[in-house]
């Protein structure tokens, strides 16, 4: 079975524009996003080419920088590529592409060596890379840095390297409004920043690496910038997408009233921490033989069920039986964050509950990062590459970003090298329906908060057909009037993107009348072999 859905969108571009009245910039390769996929791609562009990287905020703000656990890689002689691949495929519940899994798992050790070459400092034990274990893995194979701040260290090294390249420029605090297309090819992007306003960036090749959409949910580990902008702009440009119903929820997010939702790494459970409920009962063995080291989808549902049983707002991580030396060495940043709330994780229980974490669905790519739109490549969380299937295995995300970032950079560079400089103002036009007449300004914050609450309640860890239908009606209602406004600032454009991505997630979730991986339908609790296929969506 292969399902293809179409979804209407009111207009191709979010804003009207006249190419004769706004600034133009020119580059050989445009990279949209400055996380690990985008920066790794930039390092593969031939230095003879001009490269422009744009990012929504400062380059250091990304899910990549916030990543704690590490990168999955086979380095232990007792481990094997086959084992890593099998663990990935088992977690993916029938939707992984076996060849993609094989290629990426076998490339992992080389990708680690390249990071070390770029200056990344991994943790070592007795002269060898330290390895830990996480949920769903059969061996200790997670390489990490700074204890529990792997992403921060890797991005430091990569950003320092890319900033030394004289032919690469980084535009921070730059919002991408839409991809520019002409003759069914991507020719760059329309962007906005406070320095130039709206600007055309013309590019011979474009790489999309905008990350995920976790900020569509009230409870999330993602930074404010993760509003699904890349998914939305790709869809409006006619790019094929799939698996939009597959949002992964991380089981353990610090839950303290008044505090930000801080990720508590899976490595904490990998080092032996237990999950207990409000009564002190260790409940995970009741749900899975792997207990705390079961895959994330199972642990998230188990926590939710236990919270309902006990009528309590969270469960707790218990590290009290672990040595304080181990905890201090492995989790210094988690210790520091918890200490701000008066918690000593070597002595106190840590309150946690699940939160939206990783968007598995996205732009369809091949092994080189090529999308269905000529001139556009993609890498990282904005994509559906075939690695994760229906549930991402822990610490495979940085690995995927590195692999496809490198591949997309190489491929885009080769194509751009063979295109001569012939930039011109193409006859682009923004087709528009009638906009709403001038009225009282919309309360964008209220609509956004309502959307986040709706998605958490009805499109979260447990779903039903009725709740999904009700949510879709509500999102369509909001979108009906929000999408007809022409905004002139990022909060409006972000909200329009969020409403579009929510619609794509909802129509896909309604279509998949089964439970598989992170998509759990309590009205269809069993996995249906007929649905062992991807659900594709494209613009109607």
Image (cartoon, helix red, strand yellow):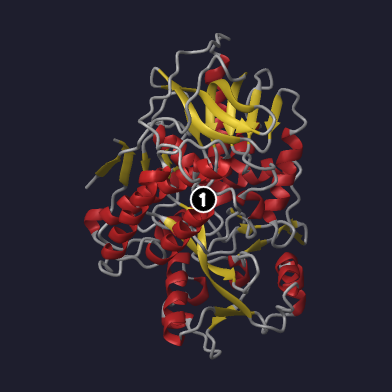
In this figure, which residue is indicated by the disc labeled 1? 444
Quadrant that contains the C terminus: top left
Taking depth in this image into account, of 247 and 312 the one nearest to the observer is 312
Q: Quadrant of residue 162?
A: top right
- Under circle 1, the secondary element is helix
Which percent across, then down, holds residue 145?
71, 56
Q: Quadrant of residue 391?
A: bottom left
Which percent across, then down, holds residue 440?
48, 46
Which percent across, then down, holds residue 231?
45, 41
Residue 366 visible in the picture: no
Give the residue at x 56% y 45%.
491
Establish if 137 lies above or below 195: below
Q: Quadrant of residue 6?
A: top left
Residue 538 visible in the picture: yes
Local crowd size for mark 1, using a 10 Å CA cut-off: few (<14), some (14–19), many (≥20): some
Establish if 490 lies above or below 454: above
């Amino acid at each position: 079975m292969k399902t293809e859905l179409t979804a209407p969108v009111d207009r191709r571009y979010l804003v009207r524009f006249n190419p004769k009245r706004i600034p133009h910039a020119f580059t050989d390769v445009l990279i949209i996003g400055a996380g690990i996929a985008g920066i790794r791609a930039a390092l593969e562009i031939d230095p003879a080419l001009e490269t422009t990287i744009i990012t929504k905020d400062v380059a250091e703000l990304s899910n990549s920088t916030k990543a704690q656990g590490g990168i999955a890689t086979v380095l232990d002689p007792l481990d094997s590529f086959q084992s890593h691949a099998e663990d990935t495929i088992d977690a993916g519940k029938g939707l992984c592409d076996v060849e993609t899994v094989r290629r990426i798992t076998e490339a992992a050790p080389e990708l680690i060596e390249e990071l070390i070459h770029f200056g990344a400092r991994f943790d070592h034990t007795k002269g060898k890379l330290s390895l830990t274990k996480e949920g769903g893995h059969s061996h200790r194979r997670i390489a990490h840095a700074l204890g529990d701040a792997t992403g921060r260290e890797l991005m430091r090294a990569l950003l320092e390297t890319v900033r030394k390249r004289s032919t690469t420029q980084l535009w921070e605090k730059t919002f991408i409004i839409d991809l520019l297309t002409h003759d069914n090819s991507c020719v760059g992007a329309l962007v906005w920043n406070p320095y130039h306003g709206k600007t055309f960036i013309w590019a011979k090749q474009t790489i999309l690496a905008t990350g995920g959409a976790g900020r569509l949910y009230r409870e999330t580990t993602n930074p404010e910038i993760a509003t699904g902008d890349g998914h939305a702009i790709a869809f409006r440009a006619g790019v094929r997408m799939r698996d939009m119903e597959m949002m992964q929820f991380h089981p353990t997010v610090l839950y303290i009233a008044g505090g930000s939702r801080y990720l508590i790494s899976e490595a904490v459970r990998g080092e032996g921490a237990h999950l207990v409920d409000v009564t002190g009962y260790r409940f995970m063995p009741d749900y899975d033989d792997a207990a705390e080291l079961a895959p994330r989808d199972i642990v998230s549902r188990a926590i939710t069920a236990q919270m309902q049983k006990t009528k309590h707002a969270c469960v707790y991580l218990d590290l009290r039986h672990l040595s304080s030396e181990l905890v201090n060495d492995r989790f210094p940043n988690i210790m520091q964050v918890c200490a701000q709330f008066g918690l000593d994780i070597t002595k106190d229980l840590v309150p946690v509950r699940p939160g939206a974490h990783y968007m598995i669905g996205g732009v369809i790519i091949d092994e080189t990062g090529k999308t269905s739109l000529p001139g556009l490549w993609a890498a990282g969380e904005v994509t559906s590459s075939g690695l994760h299937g229906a549930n991402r295995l822990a610490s495979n995300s940085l690995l995927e970003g590195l692999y496809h970032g490198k591949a997309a950079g190489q491929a885009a560079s080769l194509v751009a090298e063979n295109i001569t400089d012939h930039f011109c103002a193409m006859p682009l036009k923004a087709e528009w329906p009638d906009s709403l007449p001038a009225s009282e300004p919309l309360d964008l914050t209220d609509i956004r908060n309502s959307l986040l609450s709706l998605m958490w309640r009805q499109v979260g860890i447990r779903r039903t057909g009725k709740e999904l239908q009700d949510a879709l009606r509500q999102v369509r209602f909001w979108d009906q009037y929000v999408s007809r406004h022409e905004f002139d600032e990022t909060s409006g454009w972000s909200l329009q993107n969020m409403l579009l991505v929510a619609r794509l997630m909802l129509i896909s979730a309604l279509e998949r009348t089964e439970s598989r991986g992170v998509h759990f339908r309590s009205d269809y609790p069993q996995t249906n072999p007929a649905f062992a296929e991807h659900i594709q969506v494209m613009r109607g």
